[in-house]
Image: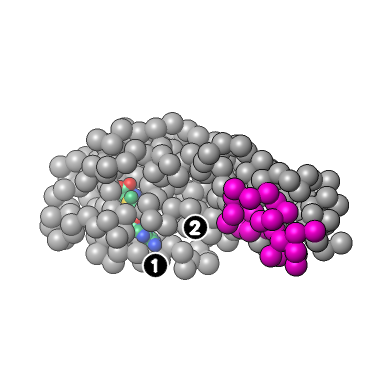
């Protein structure tokens, strides 16, 4: 936790970008937050405490990072863009951040399997093109993560926090609940970003719960989830027929799990998929 010299404002953000020659790119989902109040709000929704090690995916120019450092013990910031990663220490220095309060990791977050410290909390304004895979990757790789908040496109937020039967409910909704309890935490105005995106964004909060089973069970369960949602308009017995060698074999497995094989995947919760995975190996 540091006493900082303010957070980043819109003028400073544009000034840094211009000085280091960065034009935000769509390819890397670069929409920077230019509103310090929103950054503080995100960190407060994430329940960051002074002893927490926080990992941030895509710190960019550092707006959210400074708000995290203000409340946490240490920030682990994973940034793929080398120009941004190289500039962050200078920005932090200007805001009087102690050098032992952060670690910059210049890597593709999807390829990060280890961190120099075990993270407690994840906070990020995620790059839109990898938001779901990178989030699930971090849930899986870092079991010390207790909770967090991410800002994503509203459509993705709806999917991550969806309940069975809703249009948004799909494989990310179910998979995320293997590790975390997911909940919607409100929308944000488009005007807080530079450049202003042409879609809405929302916050999603998550809190870890007891693991539903071991890694072998998770992998089997995820295979079934993928098959069920690959053909989401089909009944389970048809959607899983390829996996089980025919529709009647699939029906038998699904029924032995106590589930109606004429249901669609979109009607099932994670525990139902787990029962099918267990039945398929008994
Ligand atoms: N946190 C900053 C903010 O809120 O202003 C920037 C958020 S911006 C939506 C996404 C950031 O993620 C950019 O800085 C981008 O360079 C970075 N990024 C994109 N793909 C990445 C990846 N695969 N691994 C790590 N960072 C990535």
Front-lying residue, 20 or 160? 160
> Where is residue 276 shown, x and y percent of the image?
77, 54
Which sits in the foreground, 119 or 93? 119
The residue at label 1 has a CB less than 8 Å from ligand 1: yes
Decide if residue 215 is on the left or right side of residue 175: right
Q: Which mark is residue 107?
A: 1
Can residue 195 be seen here? The reply is: yes
Residue in the picture at 62% in, 44% down: 266
For the point 27% across and 56% down, the residue is 26
Q: Is residue 226 above or below residue 208?
A: below
Instruction: Establish if 60 lies above or below 48.
Output: below
Residue bearing the label numbered 2: 133
At label 1, counting other C-alpha atoms closer than 10 Å, the crowd grade (few under 14, some 14-19, many 20 or more) is some
x and y percentages locating residue 34 in the rendered image = 25, 40
Please name the residue shown 63% across and 58% down the image: 227
Q: Residue at x 31, y 33 (%)?
A: 189
Up-down: is 142 above or below 153? Answer: below
Residue 228 among those drawn in magenta: yes
Query: Which segment did they paint magenta?
Result: 224-248
**Depicted 106 relative to depicted 152: above or below:** below
Residue 98, position as x, y percentages in the image: 34, 52
135 on left or right of 35: right
Position of 185 with respect to 38 (left or right) is right
Ligand 1, by image quadrant, is bottom left
Residue 87: which quarter of the image? bottom left
Q: CA distance from mark 2 to mark 1?
A: 16 Å
Q: Position of residue 234 (x, y in %)?
A: 63, 50
Q: Which is more foreground, mark 2 or mark 1? A: 2
Could you tell me which quadrant the N terminus lies in? top left
Say which mark, if any, is on residue 148: none
Q: Secondary structure at mark 1?
A: loop
């Amino acid at each position: 936790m540091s006493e900082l010299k303010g957070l980043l404002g819109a003028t400073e953000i544009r000034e840094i970008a211009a000085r280091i020659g960065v034009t935000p790119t769509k390819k890397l989902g670069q929409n920077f937050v230019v509103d310090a109040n929103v950054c503080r709000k995100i960190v407060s929704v994430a329940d960051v405490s002074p002893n927490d090690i926080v990992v941030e995916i895509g710190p960019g120019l550092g707006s959210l990072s400074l708000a995290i450092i203000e409340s946490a013990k240490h920030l682990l910031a994973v940034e793929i863009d080398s120009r941004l990663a190289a500039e962050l220490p200078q920005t932090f220095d200007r805001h009087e951040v102690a050098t032992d309060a952060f670690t910059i990791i210049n890597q593709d977050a999807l390829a990060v399997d280890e961190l120099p410290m075990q993270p407690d909390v994840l906070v990020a304004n995620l790059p839109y093109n990898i938001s779901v895979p990178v989030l699930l990757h971090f849930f899986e790789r870092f079991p010390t993560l207790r909770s967090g908040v991410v800002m994503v496109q509203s459509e993705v937020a709806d999917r991550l926090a969806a309940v069975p039967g809703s249009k948004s409910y799909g494989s990310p909704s179910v998979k995320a609940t293997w590790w975390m309890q997911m909940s919607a935490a409100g929308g944000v105005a488009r005007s807080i970003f530079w450049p202003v995106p042409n879609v809405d964004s929302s916050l999603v909060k998550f809190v870890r719960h007891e693991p539903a089973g071991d890694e072998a069970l998770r992998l089997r369960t995820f295979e079934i989830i993928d098959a069920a949602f690959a053909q989401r308009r089909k009944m389970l017995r048809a959607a899983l027929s390829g996996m089980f060698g025919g529709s009647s074999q699939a029906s038998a497995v699904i029924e032995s799990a106590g589930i109606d094989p004429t249901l669609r995947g979109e009607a099932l919760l994670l525990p139902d998929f787990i029962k099918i995975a267990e039945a398929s190996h008994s």
